[in-house]
Image (cartoon, helix red, strand yellow):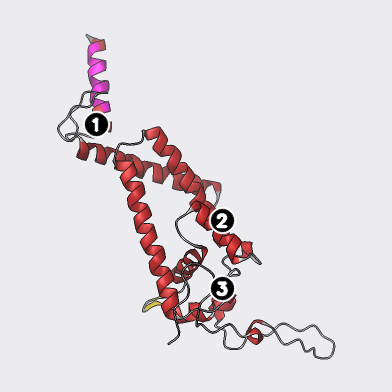
Amino acid sequence: MTDQGRAGDGTASGAERADPADSGADGDTDGGEPTVPSPAPGVPEDVRSYERFTKIEGGEYERVNDFVRERTYVTAREWAIARLCADFRTDTGVEMTKIGENLPRLVPFMTDTYTPQAVNQARAAFEGKVRKSGATFLYGAMSGFFTPEELDDTLYEVTEVAKFLLEVEGVDLTVEEELDAEDRISAAMREVREASTEVRHDGERCPNCGHEIGTETEAEADADTETETGAEADD
């Protein structure tokens, strides 16, 4: 078994390089008629038809990696392989051998093949960083360090980065889909804020509306306030 790929760049030590003959087509012609390039021998159909990352065709790994790392905690290598692991998943698991052997064909900015161990290592690194980043963000949202407006601004910024990465992968989002996703994320974060407020101030009274935190939601408290205001107006 060969060595695992290096974690921080687009190469894999000890991994076999892709055969140049596999990536080209037979240039012979027949009777002057145009020929259709024959598929590379031994390349699976789903690899030949894979069309992710085509928007950065010809991009160098270092440039792509710099771009990704400026905006996230993951490397371009981890990002690309995590995407492949999601796309090449079967009922029995992830096709890591297929991913590693065809990596340069699947991702334009990757230049070497990878061992299954190197593919698994990159996927595990991606998952670990996502968990840590998620815990950091959720703690910030639950801690009360940020106002709702500041949290909304942060959420908007990170959502824009996530959408851009999806678009680079080849996902086409309509305006309606983007707005729907933003609305659902905002609604979920409002629930997180309300729940965290109850946890941090259970039994205390809200300085804004006076309801006892932990006994009713903010929406219920607002409804009670409106009812009381209406009753006072009737008097």
**Pick the front one: 204 or 32:** 204
Instruction: State the residue at coordinates (44%, 41%).
Output: 154
Q: Horizontally, is 201 left or right of 152 in the view?
A: left
Residue at figure coordinates x 26%, y 32% from the top left = 218
Instruction: Point out the residue furthest to the right here.
Output: 32
Foreground label between 2 and 1: 2
Q: Is residue 93 magenta?
A: no
Q: Nearer the viewer, mark 3 or mark 2?
A: 2
Q: Amino acid at mark 2?
A: Phe
The kind of residue tagged 3 is Leu
Residue 64 in the image: x percent, y percent? 58, 61
The percent coordinates of residue 162 (x first, y second) are: 49, 52
Q: Which residue carries the number 1 mark?
A: 220
Assess disc 3: are there few (<14), some (14-19) or many (≥20) residues with their C-alpha within 10 Å of its C-alpha.
Answer: many
Q: Residues within 10 Å of mark 1 (few under 14, many from 20)?
A: few
In the image, 173 versus 192, the foreground residue is 192
Asked if 25 appears above or below 159 in the picture, the reply is below
Q: Is residue 231 magenta?
A: yes
- The earlier-in-sequence mark between 3 and 2 is 2
Q: Residue at x 51, y 77 (%)?
A: 12
Q: Residue at point 25% right, 22% down?
A: 225
Question: Residue 121: where, in percent of width, then height?
Answer: 40, 72
Residue at which label 2 appears = 67
